[in-house]
Amino acid sequence: MRCKSSELPAPQELPLSYNSDFQKDFIERSLLLIQQYNGQYDATVLMNCLLGLVIVPHERCFFELPCDPISDFEIKWGIPSSSIIGQGNYCQSKKYNPDGLQYSFRFFVHDLRISIAHFKIQPVPESGPVQSFRFCNDHGFVSEIPLENLREFVTKFANLLKTM
């Protein structure tokens, strides 16, 4: 059943605007959404913010992302190393890894981007309250990240992007 327009709340009359640095504003607003929203769509808001945040570095600063090893993910990024089930093969690509580096945070972010952009994500469990998200892509990447760890990662990642 659809609501009649007379039953819908009136939209706020606020101008939609950004400062001259759209990228910085986008990151800061995403961080505010993550920190301030607490409602029934919490996991959806988190995933939407993550989508935007993983697109930014790929387009603007991919090679500036740190190359922290998986063993440092939990301390630095809130992601337990046990959450990485399968590493993607982008570290074998001359385009994305001209220096031949080992799988690292930079490639993890790239793998997340591909998973989310191609909607290869799945809530765990598939129905009911979300406990974690499972990400995968066609390049061998598989990760299942508990919701609280994903929130910590997104917050830390947004703070990193603000400095770039």
Image: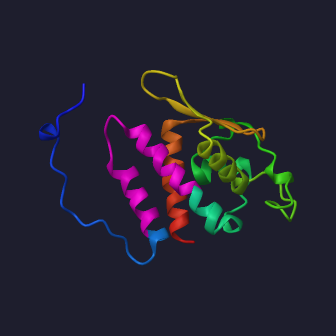
Q: Main secondary structure of the magenta part?
A: helix
Residue 100, x across and y down, in percent: 87, 60
Q: Residue furthest bottom?
A: 20
At horizontal 30% and vertical 65% (from top left) the residue drawn is 16
Residue under the image location 77 percent in, 42 percent down: 87
- Please state, as top left, top right, bottom left or bottom right, where the C terminus lies in the image: bottom right
Q: Is residue 42 above or below residue 11?
A: above
> Is residue 61 positioned above or below 34 on the image?
below
Answer left or right for 44 relative to 53: left
Q: How many marks?
A: 0
Looking at the image, is 148 positioned above or below residue 127? Answer: below
Quarter of the rendering containing residue 31: bottom left
- State which region is magenta: 25-54
Corner quadrant of residue 68 = bottom right
Q: Is 91 colored magenta in this rendering? A: no
Taking the view exactly as shown, the residue that stands out farthest to the left is 6
Specify the quadrant of the image occupied by residue 94.
Answer: bottom right
* 29 falls in the magenta region: yes
**Does 138 sit above or below residue 53?**
above
Residue at image position (63%, 64%) is 59
